[in-house]
Image (cartoon, rainbow, N blue to C red):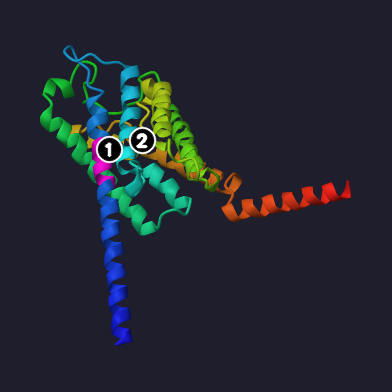
C-alpha cells in the first residue's frame, strides 16, 4: 500500500513538473512573438507613418520591458537564443530546456512577425526606407561583413554581461527594476549600433523577418556575432567575476574574525 501511494505521489510530481515546463515554454513563445510584433510595428516608416532611428531604438527597449514585466516571472523572458545560451553556460537551465527555449523563440518570432504582415498594409512593410521589409537587419553598405559581425559580437557581449550581472547571486536582492534596466540597455545598444547593423543581438529577431521576406544577405552575421558574443561573455563572467553566496558568506566571516582579532590585539 505504501509503495502504491509513493508511486502515485511520484507520478503526480512528474506530471506537475511537465505541465510547469510546458507553461514556461509557452510563455517564452508568447513573449518572443510580442517582441517581434510590437517591436517591428514601432519601426514602420514610410510617407504616411513617420519614424526615426531614435524612436525605433527606444521602442524596442520599451517592448523588452513589457515582455519581462509580463513573462519574466514565468519563464525569465529570454526572448533571445543568445541569452538562453548564456543562461545554460551559467548553469541556470538544463540542456533540454535550453533547446525547448530555442524552438519557442524561433516559432514565437515567426508568429509575431507573420501577424504583423497579416494586419499591416504592404506599404507599411515595404517602403523606400525598408525595401527588403521592415525590421530586416542588414549591414550598412559602408561596412564589410567582418566589421558587421564584430559589431554584433561586441554589443551582444555587453548585453550578456548585463544578464550575468543580474543573475549573479550578489544581485539577488535587486530584482525589482530588472525590466527597466534591460529595456534601457536594449535602447542604448540599439541607439549605438542600430545604424550600422540594425543592432540585432538576437538570431530569432533577425531570422523571422529574413524568412518572411526572403532577405538572406549577410544573414550569417546575425547568428555568428550574437552567439559567439554570448558564449565568450558568459564564460568570462562566470569564471572571472561570479561568486557563490556560500563563498561570499565565508569571506565575510573570515573578514569579521580578522577584524575582531585585530581589535582584541589593539
110 up-or-down from 218: above or below: below
Residue at numbered disc 1: 207
In this rendered view, identify the residue nearer to me: 120 or 253.
Answer: 253
State the extent of the magenta-drawn residues as a range.
28-34
In this rendered view, identify the residue nearer to me: 103 or 70.
Answer: 70
Q: Position of residue 256 (x, y in %)?
A: 73, 50
* 263 left or right, relative to 254: right
Residue 218, by quadrant, is top left
Residue at numbered disc 2: 222
The residue shown at (25%, 24%) is: 42
Label 1: how many residues lie within 10 Å, few (<14), some (14-19) or many (20+)?
many
In this rendered view, identify the residue nearer to me: 245 or 148.
Answer: 245
Q: Position of residue 212 (x, y in %)?
A: 19, 35
The quadrant of the image that shows the N terminus is bottom left
Label 2: how many residues lie within 10 Å, few (<14), some (14-19) or many (20+)?
many
**Residue sticking out furthest to the right:** 266
* 169 left or right, relative to 213: right
Q: Position of residue 202 (x, y in %)?
A: 35, 37
88 up-or-down from 225: above or below: below
Magenta stretch mostly in which secondary structure?
helix
Distance from Cα at disc 2 to Cα at disc 1: 8 Å
* 239 left or right, relative to 96: right
**Residue sticking out furthest to the top:** 47
The residue shown at (23%, 21%) is: 130
Q: Secondary structure at mark 1?
A: helix
Amino acid at each position: 500500500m505504501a509503495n502504491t501511494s509513493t508511486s502515485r505521489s511520484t507520478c503526480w510530481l512528474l506530471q506537475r513538473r511537465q505541465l510547469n515546463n510546458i507553461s514556461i515554454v509557452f510563455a517564452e513563445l508568447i513573449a518572443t512573438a510580442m517582441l517581434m510584433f510590437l517591436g517591428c510595428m514601432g519601426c514602420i516608416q514610410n510617407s504616411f507613418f513617420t519614424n526615426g532611428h531614435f524612436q525605433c531604438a527606444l521602442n524596442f527597449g520599451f517592448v523588452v520591458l513589457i515582455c519581462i514585466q509580463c513573462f519574466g516571472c514565468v519563464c525569465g523572458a529570454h526572448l533571445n537564443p543568445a541569452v538562453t545560451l548564456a543562461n545554460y553556460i551559467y548553469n541556470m537551465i538544463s540542456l533540454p530546456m535550453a533547446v525547448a527555449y530555442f524552438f519557442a523563440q524561433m516559432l514565437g518570432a515567426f508568429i509575431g512577425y507573420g501577424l504583423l504582415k497579416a494586419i499591416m498594409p504592404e506599404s507599411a512593410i515595404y517602403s523606400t526606407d525598408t525595401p527588403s521589409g521592415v525590421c530586416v537587419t542588414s549591414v550598412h553598405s559602408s561596412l564589410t561583413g567582418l566589421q558587421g559581425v564584430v559589431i554584433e559580437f561586441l554589443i551582444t557581449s555587453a548585453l550578456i554581461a548585463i544578464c550575468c550581472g543580474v543573475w549573479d547571486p550578489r544581485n539577488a536582492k535587486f530584482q525589482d527594476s530588472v525590466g527597466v534596466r534591460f529595456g534601457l540597455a536594449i535602447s542604448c545598444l540599439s541607439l549605438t549600433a542600430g545604424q550600422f547593423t540594425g543592432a540585432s543581438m538576437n538570431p530569432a529577431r533577425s531570422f523571422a523577418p529574413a524568412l518572411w521576406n526572403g532577405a538572406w544577405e549577410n544573414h550569417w552575421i546575425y547568428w555568428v556575432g550574437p552567439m559567439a558574443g554570448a558564449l565568450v561573455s558568459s564564460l568570462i563572467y562566470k569564471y572571472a567575476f561570479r561568486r557563490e553566496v556560500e563563498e561570499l558568506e565565508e569571506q565575510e566571516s573570515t573578514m569579521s574574525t580578522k577584524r575582531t582579532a585585530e581589535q582584541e590585539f589593539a
